[in-house]
Image: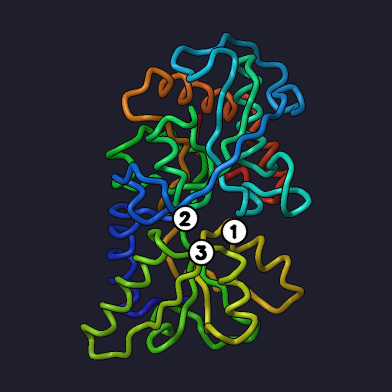
Amino acid sequence: MTRSRSTALFAAVTTAALLALTACGSSNDAGSSSSSSSSSSSSSSSAGSSSAGSSAAGAAPAGLINDGEMSLCIDPEYPPMEYYENGTSGDPIGFDADAARALAELWGVELTFEVTTFDGLMPALQAKRCDVLWSALYMSEARLEVADATAFFNTGPGLIVPTGSSIATSDDLSGKTVAVQGGGANEQTLVTLSEQFEGESKPGITIQPYPKTAETVAAVTNGKADALIETDVAAADMVSKSAGKLEVVPGVFPADTQFGVFTVKGSELSPAVAEGVSTLIENGTLAELATKYGLDPESLPAA
């Protein structure tokens, strides 16, 4: 598919927006220490319940909030990365949750979950309510100003439309209504593109932000929105569960960012997380989990 001049320009602008702001992440989560809009709960999961990384052996690193325990901030509303198996309760599963189990097993510690809402993830980490934030968040410049991060998956935005839609490029979003989980870089991507359209004397985009990804899907399937923007890994999962009602439009946005595992800025735990993630990539654990959850192992970074 050949991109027009304005689409190519948008790709460059989008890259900057993705780096400058949050994505698949909370609004103002880079510098905010307030979590008044979020709710959280804690649960524990035995690290030994996952077979991933069971052959790895190591000692618990320095810097954990509680000895013998790794607490994980997570929002289990984002399959296949993190979700509840029964939809509403229990221990989270998914790529991120199981990868965190493997990391805890590598260290020989218990894993506990600090479940919080989407916009409360980074504030919870900054408030030291958890040791690690592993919940499909982009490694944006704004986040990296306030937290350390280790890349674990290459990703980017994806566009979902009703099956048979005429939308094929970013140019086709001019004058359209697009749903998005609010407050992150995906929303800012739409703002940037809409402003670009208006600067070219074209109709802008009507942006519909929603708190949850399920609501963005409903907006499209119910005809309230022409399309929705989501990370490519979540987009593939959404389409697979749509009974043929939705499809992904390939190549609309550049896939040029990464999900990261976050720790408190300057924490002595940060290098241990980086080393642990590298080990789980090198020993094949994360590749196995990627396959298990329908992700492409080739999207894992080099160890």
Q: Residue furthest front?
A: 36
Say which residue appears at 73% left-offset and 66% top-offset: 241
Q: CA distance from mark 1 to mark 3?
A: 15 Å
Task: Look at the numbered discs 2 and 1 and tell me whether their residues touch, using CB distance below 8 Å.
Answer: yes
Pointer 2 or 3: first along the chain: 2
Disc 3 crowd rating (10 Å Cα; few below 14, some 14-19, many 20+) is some
Q: Decide if residue 288 is on the left or right side of residue 173.
A: right
Up-down: is 252 above or below 135? Answer: below
Picture coordinates of residue 249, whole percent (x, y): 55, 73
Q: Kindly indicate the quadrant of the structure image that contains residue 87.
A: bottom right
Check disc 2 and report the residue beneath it. Answer: 24
Q: Are marks 2 and 3 in contact (CB under 8 Å)?
A: no
Q: Exactly how many numbered labels are in the figure?
A: 3
Q: Residue at x 43, y 66 (%)?
A: 253
Q: Point out the residue furthest to the top here.
A: 59
| Residue 292 placement, left or right of 103 | right
Which residue is more in the foreground, 184 or 248?
Answer: 184
How far apart marks 2 and 3 lie (CA) works out to 11 Å
Marking on residue 211: 3
Q: Mark 3 or mark 1, which is nearer the start of the sequence?
A: 3
* Disc with the residue nearer the chain's start (2 vs 1): 2
- Describe the element under mark 2 as helix, strand or loop: loop
Amino acid at dot 2: Cys
Image vertical order of residue 91 relative to residue 263, above or below: below
Instruction: State the separation of the CA atoms marked 2 and 1.
Output: 10 Å
The circle drawn on residue 234 is 1
